[in-house]
Image: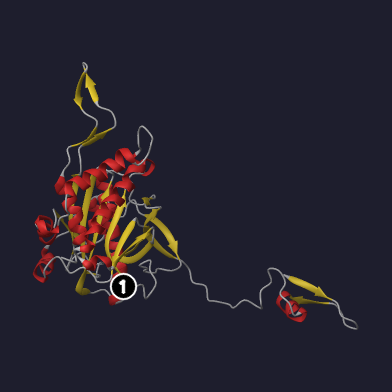
Amino acid sequence: MLFLRRSAGRVPRWVPCGQQRRTKMHYGPKLPKGPLPRTPWTGPVIILSIAFKDGNFSYSMKQMGRVKQASWLTKTKVIDGLPLRILSIMTDTANQLENQDERVLNAISHARFWVSSEEEIMEETYCPVLLEDLLHLCRSMATKHPLLAKRMVAQDYRVSATWERESILLQIRGVNGKLLNAMNPLEPVASKDEILATENDVLETLYPIAPTIDLQEVNKYETKNDTGFRTGYPYPHPHTIYFAHGDKYHRMRPEQLRAKMLMFAFGNALAKARVLYGDEPKVLEKPIVVQSVATNGQSFQFVVFQLNTTDLDPSHGVKNLAWIDADQLLYEDARNRPEIRKKIVTIPAGGHGYQPVTFKKFLAFYLHGVV
């Protein structure tokens, strides 16, 4: 933008807007302080992106969205069930609440019947309420385990991690659910011998389908790794990611949900590894463990992920590890009205089929790292 300045005895000439403002000795609207600095332009980098919008799948991985695909992308060996450390915490009676079953049943009733005056409470309403009520029960264990007070929950933070897989540049980014952060990291779940034994494992592929067939190709000008938190945050270590998957408009199948949980646990662990160990691919001296729990308000999914290596390009060598415990019901049914057949109440109103083992797993995930 140029302005015309007239002065006595001089020929009118064009003057840059920044120079005109300096002669007026005041700031004009929308005028820069001076000429803008010239920065070298660099072209974008083509990345196959695993993107999430508002905590849900966008185009990426929506068609395939399987744990098998996620395990190949993250160079991970998947193990069914939970690690022994979680099982030992779960079976120890000292790690349980007083009147635990009664309090969990009250939490279920609060989410399913008492949270609203509506006759039928929708899943997108009772699902996050149930998750928050269960977390509140877990936080009450802080009187017995003071280290639980050195944690913080972050909501809707953004994570970004970039890596190469067989010479393909990949990135995971987007909004998580709730992230439980801790002042101290979780100890490795697998021993060094178990980690070295993964060198002989062969990852399952989707042949003849390419594992990246449904990933979104985007142009990125900066391939950064970001944990979502500033340097100096007092709770820097990711502990557990919680997903309340009750949105009926973006509902996933359980297999897709477990793939999302695995990818986000991997993304948080990889972003943290970049901060601690740098960008050079290597087998980590101390593996990084991140947990993930998801629920639709009735069924729960549990994932424990251990990042052993950031050398993700080749398929040989040390692999990462993930333990998955799928489709664990907290209760079988909850209904506002009784089911009546031939004037006989066959199923009364209320919750039915409570499974106490599921909450024990939920509580064991929360207590992991302090007991």
Q: For mark 1, does the 10 Å Cα neighbourhood hold few (<14), some (14 to 19), or many (20 or more) residues?
A: some
Q: Can the viewer see residue 37? A: yes
Residue 19 percent across, percent down from the top left: 73, 79
Residue 4 relative to residue 100: left or right: right
Q: What residue type is labelled 1?
A: Arg
Residue 304 relative to residue 53: left or right: left
Q: Can the viewer see residue 211? A: no
Residue 195 percent across, percent down from the top left: 13, 68
Q: Out of 174 and 228, give the one closest to the viewer.
A: 228
Which quarter of the rendered picture does the N terminus lie within?
A: bottom right
Q: Residue, x 17% and y 41% (percent of image)? A: 354
Residue 230 percent across, percent down from the top left: 39, 72
Q: Out of 165 and 355, give the one closest to the viewer.
A: 355
Residue 130 percent across, percent down from the top left: 29, 47
Q: Residue furthest top?
A: 342
Which residue is the site of mark 1?
Answer: 274
